[in-house]
Image: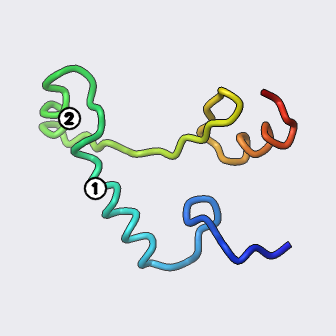
Amino acid sequence: MNHPYRHPLVDPIPDRAIELKLEQLAASYARQAAAGPPGARAELDRYDVPVILQAVYEWGGYRYSNASNAIAAAKRGTK
């Protein structure tokens, strides 16, 4: 089955423009990302430790870091 819509994170299209938009989005949210205890953000910056945003998939009350695992759980109908 051929779907006209492709999700840019699950079904990447080899298009540098999309990749750049995602990088810009990640950079814009990096400063807002939770850094733990107060002052942790400054420490992370001081030691040049980047904040990495990661997709998390939620289904049936469980969270998955891998899209394939979330899809498999949904197909099984496990809740």
Q: In the drawing, what numbered circle is on residue 60? A: none
Q: Nearer the viewer, residue 58 or 49?
A: 58
Q: Quadrant of residue 10?
A: bottom right
Dot 1: what SS? Answer: helix
Question: Disc 2 residue type?
Answer: Leu
Left/right placement of residue 4 relative to residue 43 reads right
Left/right placement of residue 50 relative to residue 75 reads left
Residue found 20% across the figure and 35% down from its top: 44
Dot 2: what SS? Answer: helix
Q: Nearer the viewer, residue 14 or 21?
A: 21
Left/right placement of residue 35 relative to residue 71 reads left
Residue found 71% across the figure and 41% down from its top: 70
Quadrant occupied by the N terminus? bottom right
| Label 2 close to label 1 by CB (< 8 Å) | no
Question: Disc 1 residue type?
Answer: Ala
Quadrant occupied by the C terminus? top right
Residue 61, percent from left and from top = 66, 27
- Whether 45 is drawn above or below 11: the answer is above
Which tag is nearer the camera, tag 2 or tag 1?
A: 1
Q: In the drawing, what numbered circle is on residue 27? A: 1
Q: Earlier in the sequence, mark 2 or mark 1?
A: 1
Residue 12, percent from left and from top = 59, 68
Q: In the drawing, what numbered circle is on residue 44? A: 2
Residue 77, percent from left and from top = 85, 35
